[in-house]
Every structure is written in C-alpha cells, then in structure tokens.
Image (cartoon, grey):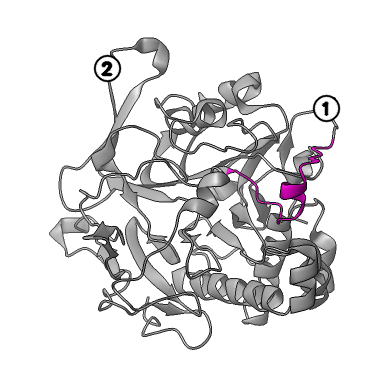
Amino acid sequence: MWHKSLKTKSNNTRETLNKDPELDSHPPIAMCRFLVYKGSDEILLSKLILDPSHSILKQSFDSRLRLDTRRGQNNADGFGIGFYTDPKLGAAPCLFTSTIPAWNCTNLHRIASKTASRLIFAHVRATTEGTLSEDNCHPFYHASLMWMHNGGLGGWKHIKRRLGQRLADKWYLGVVGGTDSEWAFALFLDTLERMGHDPSSKSEHGFGPTVLRKAMLKTIEIINELTDSIPRDVIDSENVDTRSLLNFAVTDGHSVICTRYISSSTDEAASLYYSSGTQWEEKPSVVPASGQNFYMERRDKGADIVLVASEPLTFERENWVNVPTNSILTIHKQTVMVHPIIDNYYSRSPNHFRSSAFVQTKGLIANEKASTRGPICPIPDLQNGHAKKPMGITLPLRDGANGSPPERLLSPLSPGRGFRVNGRLASMEHS
C-alpha cells in the first residue's frame, strides 16, 4: 500500500542479529539519520546527499559528531531517498531504496547527480534487529504522504499487538516490513483518517500544516498511551525500557512536520538541527578529497531554503540551529515554526535539565552542539548551569510579489506555551 516505487536488487538477505543481552533488554533503537530539504527552487540531490563535507552519505560510514559506542559508526542496513517531481506526473513522491550500503551504491550516485527537486527526504539506516530488506528502508509513503523516523518505540514487543488492533484493516494490512517505524506510519495514517481526512487524497494543495501537525501530535499521544499501559510487573521482570525516541518527519509534498521527542522528562532526545537561508552555496575546499564545502548563505531576513538533519551537513557551526528536545517543527512555504510539545514530559521550569547520557551511548546525539548564533535561536541550551525555557519562534518568508509583506504561518507563542499532546491545541487553528 505504501511500498517503494524504485528498488535495487541485492543478494544479501541476512538478518541483523545481535546477541548482546544489554541490547536485547531494550527497544530496537535504530541509529538512523535523516535529512529534509524544502526550497523554493529545485536542487540536485547530489548537493545534499553526496557532495557536502559531512553529507548524510559520509555520515553513514564516517560520522564526526554522532558516535555509537555499541555498534560502531556504520549505517549499513539500507538507505532511501524520496522526492517530489512535476505535479503533472501525480501527487505521489518518487522513492529509491536499497540495502546496499549508501557509500557503495553506484545507482545512487547516478540518480543523485541527475535528479533535482524542491522537496527531498533522505534516510540511512542502522538497526539492532530485523531483516535487512528494502521493505524496511525509509522513507515510506502512501499517496502524497511520505514518512521517516529516527529512534524507536519504547517497549515495542509489548505494544505491537495492541497498536495493530487500533488500526483499520486497510492500514494494518498495508504494513509490509517489520519496523516499528512503518507501524508508526500506519498509526499516523489511521489517525489522519479518524480526524476526517482521507490519507489517499491527492489534493493540489495537500492537507495543510495544521492537519498534519494535529495528526502527528495525536500519533505521539497514542504511542505514549500504549507504552504507559505496559504492566509494571512486566517492566520490572523483563527490564523493559519504555522510553520512545520519536524523531519523525512527514510531508504531503507541500508542508513538512518534524519532531524531536523522547517520552522522558529527564533525558535528551536524538539530535536534530535545522538551517535556513537564501542559497546553499559551494565554496572551494582546501582538502579536495574530503568533499566539497557548502554553507548556507543568508542575504536577507527571509528564507528560500530550509534543511532539517539529524546531523549538520557541514562544519559551518553558525549555519545550524539545534531543535530543542520535545519540540515540533513546521515548514510551510519556507516559513519555519518551532514549538514545545506540552505533555507529561514537558517542564515549565526554566531550571529544568536533561541528561544526554541515554542517547549518547546509542550514537543518537552529537558530541558537540551546533552554534547558537543563528538568525533565530530556540535552543534550550545551558545558561549558568540551567536550561532556558523553550519558546515558540517564527522564521518569516521572503517578501511576497511586488514587495508585499511576507506571509506568516502562525503567530509566535509566548514563552512556555506550545502544542498539547493530551488536550486542545493552544491557539493554533489559524494557519
């Protein structure tokens, strides 16, 4: 139902089996990485996926920021790219997936050097369990919707059956792989439909950012309800880790919703960054063999390009902004909105501190943070040993036609306000 449209064949059908008892007692956290590009102009995939000095392809075998102390630093369990083409060809994205390691796939280089798009998803995968299969490679799609995930659902083997029971038959039967990420996408589709929207719709303008955002927040809420319902005696006897790492990305070809989230009030989530500007520029490299140097140029206050990535694609620190833990990021017409997700794991205290130890051992957070010196800085970074309170922020569009004022997606929220997972959205209905 949301199967891949382009595939390469591989003779490798091994299963990635891990006998480490410590890993077996925890959820299948995949040390994946993803990348989102949304721009007013098309860009060659190679300028994002292959060429930058710290491109997602290079991260898959030589990450300089996220280091997994348990499995090494290779993302060799498959990759995928998804992009939107001419609307005349249909609303669905084009996908290319493979179980060949991304750095060793000739077809990826051929396609990326000749393909351009205004909206691109890319994902490299490393997992602790499951079959090495193209069915398990992100992104996943259904009709115009595309989805990818970095992280894992807490207590997965204890909630999988109940999650499936919540789904309508068509979404349940549409799952073809074995990842918790694809089941989460099925839950998102089911949630979207229960909200009164047809996931199979191919509207010219998509679903709109508000609808996608509500469906995403409800999906997270349901996942938390499922993990919260695992009996305490089971958690204790089987050493079940109920913390979910939910860095999701979804798009309808027009708007993009990303989350950086963990179902914990004391831990950091897997890293996520964004960069915005007017042009993704290439500059000469002093070490040609290390890849090309790119940087995000900003000629005015607006943005023609937005990048979201698990790790920065370059070492230009001033180009990248750290998305706060337990936040939702919305991109609509190159307007960027970041707001905190208010639920049981949110703290209004400006002194609240989160530990990065959990995600550091899994290679899901960078060893150093990106620069806080950006056009907008929503980072809940440490100040005098205490965390600053997260704020809602807006990055406006460039000026409209004939010098008209730029549109706004949403008005900024005051500090401490944000989207509610359990309850009504806070003044967010006018996008």
x and y percentages locating residue 72 in the rendered image: 61, 31
Q: CA distance from mark 2 to mark 1?
A: 39 Å
Q: Is residue 196 above or below residue 201?
A: below
Left or right of 203 on screen, residue 119: left
Give the mark nearer the N terminus: 2 vs 1: 1
Left or right of 227 on screen, residue 110: left
Secondary structure beneath disc 2? loop
- Using the rendered image of the protein, determine whether residue 85 is visible from the camera's viewpoint: no
Left or right of 267 on screen, residue 136: right
Q: Nearer the viewer, residue 205 or 396?
A: 396
Q: Is residue 136 above or below residue 416?
A: above
Left or right of 105 on screen, residue 283: left
Kind of residue at disc 1: Asn
x and y percentages locating residue 246 in the rendered image: 57, 60
Q: Could you tell me what secondary structure mostly forms the magenta stretch?
A: loop
Secondary structure beneath disc 1? loop
Label 1 neighbourhood size at 10 Å, few (<14), some (14-19), many (20+)?
few
Q: Nearer the viewer, mark 2 or mark 1?
A: 1
Residue at numbered disc 1: 12
Give, as a single range, the part of the protein colored magenta.
15-32
Q: For the point 55% across and 45% down, which residue is it?
A: 361
Q: For the point 65% across and 47% down, which residue is it?
A: 30
Q: Nearer the viewer, residue 312 or 109?
A: 312
Q: For the point 53% across and 51% down, which residue is it?
A: 359
- Asked which quadrant contains residue 248, the reply is bottom right
Q: Is residue 187 magenta?
A: no
Which label was assigned to residue 284?
2
x and y percentages locating residue 263 in the rendered image: 56, 68
x and y percentages locating residue 267 in the rendered image: 49, 62
Contact between labelled residues 1 and 2, with CB atoms less than 8 Å apart: no
